[in-house]
Amino acid sequence: MRNLLSSSTRGAQLFLLASIITSVWWFITNDVSLASVGLVLLGYFVYGCLGIVVTFHRKLTHESYNTWPLLTKIFAIFGCFAGTGSPLAWVAIHINHHLKSDQPGDPHSPVYEGAKIFLLNYAHQVDASTKFRMRNIVSDPFHQFLHRYYFAVLFVWGAILFLIGGMQLLVPAFLAPAVVTALMSNVVNYVGHKPNWLGGSRRFNLKDFSANNWIWAIPSWGEAWHNNHHRYPKRWNFGMTAYEIDISAMVIRLIKTK
């Protein structure tokens, strides 16, 4: 599994680089319409909110709520389209982050890695503790398939969009939203461990540097209430007061079965 995770990291880096170059080129050389901007925002919601935050993070990693299994599978596919790794790779990285938060071995701590975390150069240390915590997803044939054929899944989705609408659809509906999702995920990883950053604060005095950041809360679908999350990782609602808006929690409230 370690080799598969390393390959996933290198592939995600290449996909992100290609997506950035293609998206910048396309938006510079084409007239940007409201429809194109709308597709980017819709893609960011589907891939980033429903796929990464609601499913990869709060469901598959922390198992903070229950919903219909078919819906979890559909949303997991959406998360794959974000281009930041398969569900298995993503869960392994995030479990390690919580186990070693702001300590040596944390895969994306700005304390040790600084801005390099934006390169998706995450360390994959799948030890016995990590495997035990992700035992349910590791043994799931569906997620094994998504992991092994992850880049084939990306290629097929991109090919479908290209055949339907060419670059006019491929870029704003896939590549650009993937760039936004990757960027925002690492914004949360960065400002979420910078208490003195603009908008930052700490409700709980934990052993790491986790911080809430109200500026990035809505753009990150609620993930920027990061100090709250590190204090209560099994809680599906990161907002703890009425003004701590958590859009992902609003989605989860609609789909959770208990």
Image: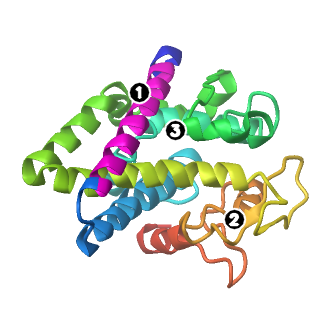
Chain-order first, disc 3 or disc 1: 1
Q: Amino acid at mark 1?
A: Gly
Using residue 19 as the reference point, say whether residue 62 is left or right of it.
right
User: Magenta segment, which residues?
Assistant: 5-28
Instruction: Answer whether residue 78 is visible to the viewer in this image.
Output: no
Badge number at residue 90: 3
Q: Tell me the element at label 2.
A: loop
- Using the image, determine if residue 114 lies above or below residue 42: above
Residue under the point 72% across and 55% down:
192
Q: CA distance from mark 2 to mark 1?
A: 30 Å
Look at the numbered discs 3 and 2 and tell me whether their residues touch, using CB distance below 8 Å.
no
- Using the image, determine if residue 17 lies above or below residue 215: above
Chain-order first, disc 2 or disc 1: 1
Please state the horizontal and vertical placement of residue 7, each as a whole percent of the image. 45, 20
Quadrant housing residue 194: bottom right
Reply yes or no: does residue 42 show up in magenta: no
Quadrant housing residue 146: top left
In the displayed image of the protein, which residue is found farthest to the front? 29
Chain-order first, disc 3 or disc 2: 3
- Using the image, determine if residue 27 lies above or below residue 8: below
Question: In terms of depth relative to the viewer, which is nearer, 99 or 82?
Answer: 82
Q: CA distance from mark 3 to mark 1?
A: 13 Å
Residue under the point 37% across and 66% down:
41
Badge number at residue 11: 1
- Using the image, determine if residue 148 lies above or below residue 193: above
Using residue 252 as the reference point, say whether residue 93 is left or right of it.
right
Which secondary structure class fits the magenta region best?
helix
Q: Tell me the element at label 1.
A: helix
Question: In terms of depth relative to the viewer, which is nearer, 141 or 199?
Answer: 199
Specify the color scheme.
Answer: rainbow
Per the image, the residue denoted by label 2 is 225
Quadrant housing residue 125: top right
